[in-house]
Amino acid sequence: MSTNEPIEISAASVDEAIKQALEQLGAQEDDVVIEVLATPRSGVLGLGARQARVRVTRRAVATSGVQSPPPASPPERRERPPQQARPEPQAAEPADSEESEENSQPERKPADLEQLTTEASAVLGQILELMGEKAEVVRSDGDPDSVELEIKGDGSGILIGRHGQTLDALEYLVNRIVARRIRDAAPVVLETESYRARRRQQLHRMALSMGERAKRDHRSVTLDPMPPRDRRVIHLALKDDPMLTTRSSGDGFLRSIEIVPAGGGGSPRRERGGEGRGRKRERQNRQEAVGEQGGFKHGQKRIV
Amino acid sequence: MKELVQFLAQQLVNNPDAVEVKETQGDTASVIELRVAKEDLGRVIGKQGRTAKSIRTILNAVASRTNRKVVLEIIEEK
């Protein structure tokens, strides 16, 4: 499961960088080799400031034999950036029957999905019960190649939350827990009261109208940052329009889509497109936008 | 609520027996203290605190039914 690939982390302090690295590797300090690449410097007015940087390498044979997890809970799966290559199976890890399949398994067998459905429903059912919700969990029919579980509750919207945050939280935790039990589990999607479907429709409509605006104004339109699932809907909504292209930029939860009309647009303009995802962030965006155009009066062309 | 945190934490950690949850009820809010084995701290916090945030979100959804607030504190032992 674990690799010996070193990872490099920057943070405000050396301790913080080490802590983050350990968390990312899910390792203990004793299991790794830590090299400090740079010590932090505060600099003056942001000039000459430098973050701490460490390189952390897992020792070849971790102590996983000693602290081998209970059978019911295999070691946590670690999310890695895709470019970081698949983790190689580690010899010291307790042999796992699926180990050999892992490399030669681009496709999932229906049986896996059935097991996944069973496990995920059980976990979700227990959470809902402990939440005091009277709800039933069923697998939505539809795509046989993925697992979508529908929560049939009392329709109060409490399981959706503001901007779907409760549903997202449930989904995240269910996936986290299931991933500990099933190796390489496909993501499970949770749905309730057609929230996800409604959201998709709403995003689709917004994509089309923002696309129209980009074409009409001959300038690109940048939407608010959105999670991958939402961005996907936008990309798909506009992919067949020869007059528009879409591209994403930014990192993590700040990643946002820019809709660009054919022939390139003018400087991107911030639009209150998608749902506001946190006021602080919006303000940040606005500041960035202002910074970009800094010094130019409205309507004035910017010479690059 | 306490049981919910207990369940979630135990499902997420490598040492479920080390999970300890304490709940203190106030007038309008409750404080839930969660303790886990040192090596599991990262597992209940998650990358960028995402797991902890998700647990808090769910707790507050439950609490909102009775117009209450919940504070989840993850306690790090010295």
Image: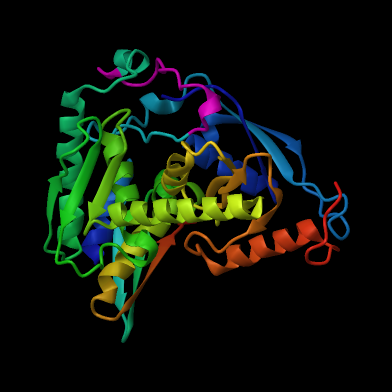
Q: Is residue A84 left or right of residue A130?
A: right
Residue at position x 27%, y 18% in the image: A98
Depth order, front residue of A257/A58: A257
Q: Is residue A153 left or right of residue B42?
A: left
Queried whether the magenta region covers residue A88, the answer comes back as yes
Residue A76, given in percent of the width and then of the height, sits at 37, 36
Q: Is residue A145 visible?
A: yes
Residue A124, given in percent of the width and then of the height, sits at 20, 50
Depth order, front residue of A26/B69: B69
Instruction: Report the magenta residues as a range.
Output: A80-98
Residue A101 lies in quadrant: top left
Residue at position x 14%, y 66% in the image: A154
Residue A33, given in percent of the width and then of the height, sits at 61, 29
What number of labels is visible? 0
Queried whether the magenta region covers residue B46, the answer comes back as no
Q: Is residue B15 visible?
A: no
Q: Is residue A266 left or right of residue B1?
A: right
Residue furthest out toward the bottom: B27
The answer to whether residue B49 is above or below residue A19 is: below
The answer to whether residue A73 is above or below residue A271 is: above
Residue A7, given in percent of the width and then of the height, sits at 60, 31
